[in-house]
Image: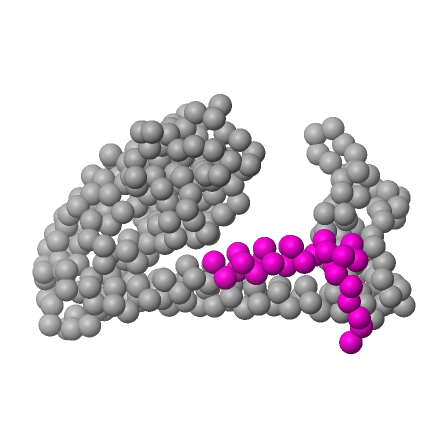
Amino acid sequence: LAQRIILLRAQAQTVDPYFLFYALQSDFGQGELKARATGTTVLGIKQSELRQVRIPLFPLPVQRRIASILSAYDELIENSQRRIRILEAMARALYREWFVHFRFPGHENHPRVPSPLGEIPEGWEVKALGDFVQFKSGFSFKSGTFTADGEHRLVTIKNVQDGAFNPESNSRMNERPAKLPPYCVLNDGDILLSLTGNVGRVCLVYGGPFLLNQRVSKLVPVETFDWTMTYSMFREAEMRMKLEQLSNGVAQQNLSPVLASKMEFLRPPRELRQQFAAIADPITRRIVQLYTTIQNLRRTRDLLLPRLLSGQLVLEAD
């Protein structure tokens, strides 16, 4: 083990290790840990203090029953996450095969022709990125209107991760601004792009609706059937590198949607893009559904956890 990590081993005759894991994750366990942590800039806990942390303790058979219920949710979450990784790999591999390596159906009958981007299949066009996708920038909300428990959740730059959306929002408000553009209301399946800091991160929204804050852009394909192609294109490392090269800023990078719209890109024929959408769109929709499933499983598990550990839900051993 590296420094600043403590290994815990449950006493087998007293505590089930999985029960111990969930007990320390609970609000009660986390409260005990934080209460005994010390430090000015970074909190830490000493072994002597850790030994004093309290957890609820049930008979060993009941502990195992609680652990089995909670771990069943974690297994379902892991299975869904595994399926997402497989499905996304499938969609991205298909995108690369057709639109990066030019091995699309019937490619043998399309000779290569010269273009500003090198040799490309006949019938393909070099266009401005703005002809394919619109960059819709977020709204500049007044931070003074934010509340801790407002009805409307805001999506900020922190919610946009690389290929993963974080639906947890600490920025909320009770009323929508009168001048809020309709596109700033986010729904499941919307594509987001980070414009500041770690420029070029892209993800799919789920668990909506949300309100789109500034420094984040919503990617809206000009043709609705280009939804998955848009997401796949912006997930490519080469696209992120190009966006980073366009960015400027002293303290942190900032991407201009106007400049991004002027980037050159290779647009395949409409019929081929529609053919791709027929195969890939159901895959991407399933990914969004699985993200929603994971969110619901986590909420249910997190609701059960304090009730089980507090004894509010009485269980009998198997």
Can residue 253 be seen here? no
Residue at figure coordinates x 31%, y 29% from the top left: 179
- Residue at 76% x, 43% y: name it: 31
- Quarter placement of the N terminus: bottom right
The number of discs equals 0
Q: Residue furthest bottom?
A: 318
Q: Who is closer to the viewer here, 25 or 145?
A: 145
Q: Nearer the viewer, residue 247 or 212?
A: 212
| Res 116 seen here | yes
- 313 vs 144: above or below: below
Left or right: residue 225 compared with residue 12: left
Indicate the quadrant containing the C terminus: top left, top right, bottom left or bottom right.
bottom right
Q: Which residues are magenta?
A: 292-318
Residue 128 image position (x, y, % from top left):
17, 44
- Percent position (x, y) of residue 65? 76, 69
Q: Is residue 293 magenta?
A: yes
Horizontal side of residue 78 vs 178, given as left or right: right
Chief secondary structure of the magenta span? helix
| Horizontal side, residue 266 vs residue 169: left or right | left
Name the residue located 86 percent from the left edge and 42 percent from the top edge: 49
In the rendered image, residue 309, in percent from the top left (x then y), is placed at 77, 56
Q: Is residue 265 above or below residue 171?
A: below
Q: Residue at x 30, y 46 (%)?
A: 219
